[in-house]
Amino acid sequence: MGLPQPLGPYAVSFADFELRRTEELQPSQSGGGGGGGGGAAAAAEPQQKQQQQQQLETNGIQQNGGQALPQDLEETPATVAVEVAAAPLMRIFYPTEAKTRWSALDAKQRCWVPNYNYMWGFVARAIPPTSLFVKICISFISLIMYSLMWFRLQIKASVQKPLLVPKGEGDKQRLPVVIFSHGMWACRTTYSSTCIDVASHGYIVVAVEHLDGSAVMAQYHDHRGKRKWVDHAFADKPFDDTPMAERTKQLRQRVQEIQKVIDVLERLDQGSLTQDFNNVTGRASLDTKFFQQRLDLNHIAIHGHSFGAATAIVASGVDNRIKCCVGEDVWWSPVEEVDYSRLAGKSPVLLLNTEGFDWASLRDCRNKFLEGRAKADNVDTPLVTVLMTIKGTEHMDQSDFPLLFPTIAKRARMTGVLDPTQTKDINSRACLDFLYRNLLPPGTGAPYVVNSVKEDGEYLVIAKTASQSASSNSV
């Protein structure tokens, strides 16, 4: 039981960071109906926005790198009761020059399930917490599972080892950044194998733990430094019973969180945050000077799976600091139809799908996005759009679950006929090759090159799109 070794030539390490909140902010409110839309609540909105902006400025952060958010994202409130102006907890994977050695002192930090509460969330996914008695049973089962598994579920990354410094001077010593957005019922560790594969090729990968209520469990600290938990917002009801409008609100909050993460990365690169601004303590706590002048923020990509892929698509369309987008099994439903053309964007996009995650309405939504890409294409700046499908795979094959729990995944039909490790390798190589061709500046060499495997072509179906350029034959 455990994750496979990374594909790349470099060992990988990680550290955690969460920006400290210095003032209490009002919880975000869902847009309610009824009434005349006025009164005290409407009058309080400008003041609340001013407080949120002051909070960002207090933390040394500006919205969207000093740019205004698109009007619909700015005016539409987020969904759950967590401060919308707050940057979420993030795990930062990076290549290291240190040799791969595991320390027993780091076993807890390297555990794929960071805390007992995450195990509670995973069990609640299988057993909906519909009553107090069921919740007690979930707690008992979770405690047993966490006690038996935490030391076995170790990721293949060390804790806070020295950062790889490329040869050269100045900007040549900076590493490109990939932000990873997790899917529904997941967290910052659920896609560790993919994040580690990418980091092992010379990228800094920032895995975000969203606070919108879509995570299996998420943690944050309030302005007093007290740790709090956000469980899955709709855990007690069937998935299809949740109104899509609520999912759209969650999506908007996710996009805002991605933008806050980029703001934080800019400050970490500048070295303007003191250690007091990191809420994370212990062995995995990121030294806030660690990445000073080491992040190549001119080459930022966003990568996500399912709901996280929808987040990646929307974020790359509204924030021009993002230069490349990789969406695995994009869940298109929460993306509003009116946004398809606007979100077509100008960034290169890879849509990497599993064979089993496919139905008519999903294809219709994807085709509308592709049509928007085609309309936005022009001769001077041709858009790169690559659509791939991995044969013999299911939706969860792009996560760590089939790698860690192969028997359970097979019996639950969470995995396809293709071997999970082989699927992971094909998936990672396709993403890495796309990033190498479309994110990095021309002429960039090692350590970013991914070793191609001819046999991958037997399992990859590459579809031709209207906006696909010659560089789309990436595998």
Image (cartoon, grey):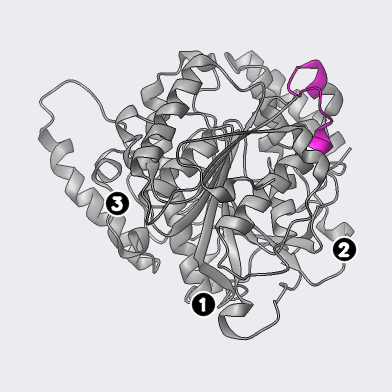
Q: Which quadrant of the figure has residue 369?
A: top left
Calculate the distance from the C-alpha at mark 1 to the C-alpha at mark 2. 28 Å
Q: Secondary structure at mark 1?
A: loop
Image point (58%, 40%), residue name: 182
**What residue is shown with label 2?**
100
Whether residue 83 can be seen here: no
Q: Which quadrant of the figure has residue 23?
A: bottom left
**What residue is shown with label 1?**
271
Q: Secondary structure at mark 3?
A: loop
Residue nearer the viewer, 71 or 426: 426
Residue 272 x %, y % = 47, 76
Image point (32%, 35%), residue name: 339
Residue 27 x %, y % = 35, 41
**What residue is shown with label 3?**
69
Residue bounds of the magenta highlight: 409-424
Residue nearer the viewer, 318 or 412: 318
